[in-house]
Image (cartoon, grey):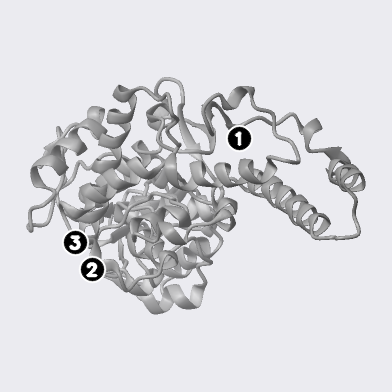
């Protein structure tokens, strides 16, 4: 299927609508680019994953981060980030039907995309939180306040403090030595970091979402020691269930239209991230690289350039690893098992030049469909590192060789 990079998300939705349930492997080619095969297809899944994280879509909780656009074009694009993984923004009682329909459509598309990726053994680059995978596996009934730490750690910490106050309240209420007056005094003296519940200034709206009322007229209902337990129950309920159920039902509908969800029933939620998104960032050591990568056509494991390469790769940080993998394979992540599971294995071949040409003047090139790195025999490890990073940064989002 040929698509235009300028309307990637819109065209990806069309592709999944037309071909998502097809048993044939999806293969992507970009307009005005002759490259075909595995590389452009892997990049398609990675780029659509990134597009789905755009802040303007309104899909995810978290904080906004601005990333520069490729080739330095225009101003940066805002994306959503969460250190614990992404989770759906909740709907409120007054959320407009048109907005709900729009968000549900995006989650239905995400379900189709993830299912097709599993069918075709492709990887996504979408950092989803553990509660997302619990919903995906229909484990939503097992979700509790303990899952809040994987959605909003700061809210989770406050909830824990307030739950501790509830436990103290119950102990006081069970103390038969208390009179009505002393019990009232003791209850109203309960505090969080020296601040009474009333003085926290809370009302029955969802933390971080002042327009979402936890119950009718909630904006005008202050939280006190006497209704605190109800408040906490509703915060958990709206964050993890009521506010997000329609999004996840749409996601599961989309997924089921392509691939049966029950085939994933033997996976734990913790395992689905690796299945869908591959190996997380890990240290690349020289020994593993030597065992897993294959020098060929002018290079052996003893070649200077190959030894330089393994030393350079073993020094890369997480972001440099992602850039290199995207450049060489088309995907910013390795499959589960890391380099050992890369198929075909990373092959390093010598890039040839005319006798009058200096290898130090050239960048490495790749054939992403076969994980093939054409590496000049650079004169120093410093030059190799510089050229690799330039190629990895600049050689993104285009496939001009077939």
Which residue does the numbered mark 3 point to in the structure image?
260
**What residue did someone put label 2 on?**
263
User: Residue at left 18%, top 33%?
Assistant: 11
Where in the figure is residue 300, as x and y percent of width and height?
Answer: 35, 75
Nearest to N terminus: mark 1 or mark 3: 1
Distance of label 3 from label 2 (alpha carbons): 6 Å
Residue, x 39% and y 45% (percent of image)? Answer: 391
Label 2 and label 1: CA atoms lie apart by 36 Å
Q: Is residue 168 visible?
A: yes
Label 1 and label 3: CA atoms lie apart by: 36 Å
Q: Quadrant of the N terminus?
A: top left
* Residue 207, numbered circle: 1
Q: Position of residue 397 (x, y in %)?
A: 30, 39
Horizontal relation, residue 170 to residue 358: left or right: right
- Proximity of marks 3 and 2: CB atoms separated by less than 8 Å: yes
Residue 100 drawn above or below residue 374 = above
Apparent side of residue 84 relative to residue 290 in the rendered image (left or right)? right
Residue in view at x 73 percent, y 47 percent: 162
In the image, residue 88 lies at what x, y percent?
A: 43, 41
Badge 2: residue crowd in 10 Å (few <14, some 14–19, many ≥20): few
Residue toward you, 329 or 50: 50
Residue 118 vertical position relative to residue 162 in the rendered view, above or below: below
Instruction: Say which element carries label 2.
Output: helix
The percent position of residue 242, horizontal first and vertical second, equals 43, 42
Determine the secondary structure under disc 1. loop
* Residue sitting at x 43%, y 72%: 289
* Secondary structure under the numbered disc 3 in the rendered image: loop
């Amino acid at each position: 299927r040929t698509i235009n990079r300028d309307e990637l998300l819109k065209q990806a939705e069309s592709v999944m609508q037309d071909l998502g349930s097809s048993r044939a492997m999806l293969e992507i080619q970009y307009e005005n680019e002759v490259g075909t095969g595995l590389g452009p297809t892997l990049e398609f899944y990675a780029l659509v994953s990134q597009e789905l994280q755009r802040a303007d879509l309104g899909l995810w909780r978290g904080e906004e981060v601005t990333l520069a656009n490729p080739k330095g074009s225009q101003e940066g694009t805002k994306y959503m980030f969460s250190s614990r993984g992404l989770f759906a923004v909740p709907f409120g009682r007054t959320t407009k039907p048109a907005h709900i329909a729009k968000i549900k459509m995006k989650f239905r598309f995400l379900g189709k995309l993830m299912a097709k990726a599993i069918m075709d053994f492709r990887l996504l680059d979408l950092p989803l939180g553990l509660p997302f995978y619990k919903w995906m596996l229909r484990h939503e009934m097992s979700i509790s306040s303990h899952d809040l730490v994987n959605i909003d750690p700061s809210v989770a910490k406050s909830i824990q403090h307030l739950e501790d106050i509830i436990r103290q309240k119950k102990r006081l209420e069970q103390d038969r030595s208390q009179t009505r007056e002393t019990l009232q005094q003791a209850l109203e003296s309960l505090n969080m970091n020296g601040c009474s519940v009333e003085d926290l200034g809370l009302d029955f709206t969802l933390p971080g979402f002042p327009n979402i009322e936890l119950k009718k007229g909630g904006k005008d209902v202050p939280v006190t020691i006497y209704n605190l337990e109800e408040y906490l129950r509703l915060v958990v309920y709206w964050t993890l269930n009521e506010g997000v159920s329609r999004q996840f039902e749409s996601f599961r509908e989309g997924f089921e239209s392509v691939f049966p969800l029950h085939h994933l029933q033997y996976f734990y939620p913790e395992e689905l991230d690796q299945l869908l998104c591959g190996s997380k960032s890990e240290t690349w050591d020289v020994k593993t690289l030597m065992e897993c990568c294959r020098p060929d056509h002018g290079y052996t494991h003893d070649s200077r350039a190959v030894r330089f390469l393994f030393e350079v790769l073993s020094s890369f940080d997480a972001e440099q690893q992602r850039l290199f993998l995207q450049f060489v394979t088309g995907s910013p992540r390795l499959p589960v098992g890391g380099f050992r599971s890369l198929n075909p294995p990373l092959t390093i071949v010598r890039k040839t030049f005319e006798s009058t040409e200096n290898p130090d003047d050239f960048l490495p090139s790749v054939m992403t469909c076969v994980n093939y790195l054409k590496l000049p025999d650079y004169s120093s490890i410093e030059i190799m590192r510089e050229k690799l990073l330039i190629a990895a940064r600049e050689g993104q989002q285009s496939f001009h060789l077939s």
